[in-house]
Amino acid sequence: LRFRLRDHTTMTPRRWSTSFLSGAEGESTRRALIILNQPFDTELLKRLWKATSWHACADGGANRLFDLTRSTSDPELVV
């Protein structure tokens, strides 16, 4: 699958690995989670939070985090 841009160049789609969610990668890999103001479920949040070492909320993401956890899951940054 390729995308054609207006200037007639082509762009190959990027493939994203989600293997870090299953713990398949080593602990030395550091990942960040940025929570935005978009709906997601509690189980996804738990998996992503556990698989990442740095957490931030932006654009209403702190409200989503609070709505799901009803606790003080403290991200490192709220903007």
Image: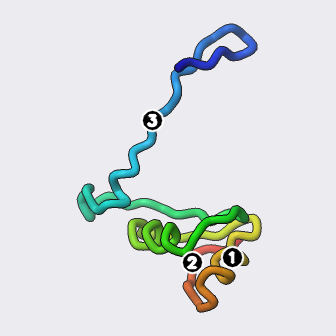
Residue 8 is left or right of residue 1, and the answer is right
Q: Which residue is pictured at 47% across the width and 74% down the height?
A: 46
Closer to the chain start, of discs 2 and 1, is 1
Q: Which mark is residue 15?
A: 3
Q: Which mark is residue 11?
A: none
- CA gap between label 3 and label 1 equals 28 Å
Closer to the chain start, of discs 3 and 1, is 3
Residue 8 is left or right of residue 34, and the answer is right
Q: Which residue is mark 2?
A: 75
Q: Which residue is mark 1?
A: 62
- CA gap between label 2 and label 3 equals 28 Å
Vertical comparison of 70 with 28: above or below: below
- CA gap between label 2 and label 1 equals 8 Å
Q: How many neighbours does mark 2 have within 10 angstroms: few (below 14), some (14-19), or many (20 or more)?
A: some
- Helix, strand, or loop for circle 1? helix
- Helix, strand, or loop for circle 2? loop
Residue sitting at the far top: 8
Residue 44 is left or right of residue 36, and the answer is left
Vertical comparison of 60 with 9: above or below: below
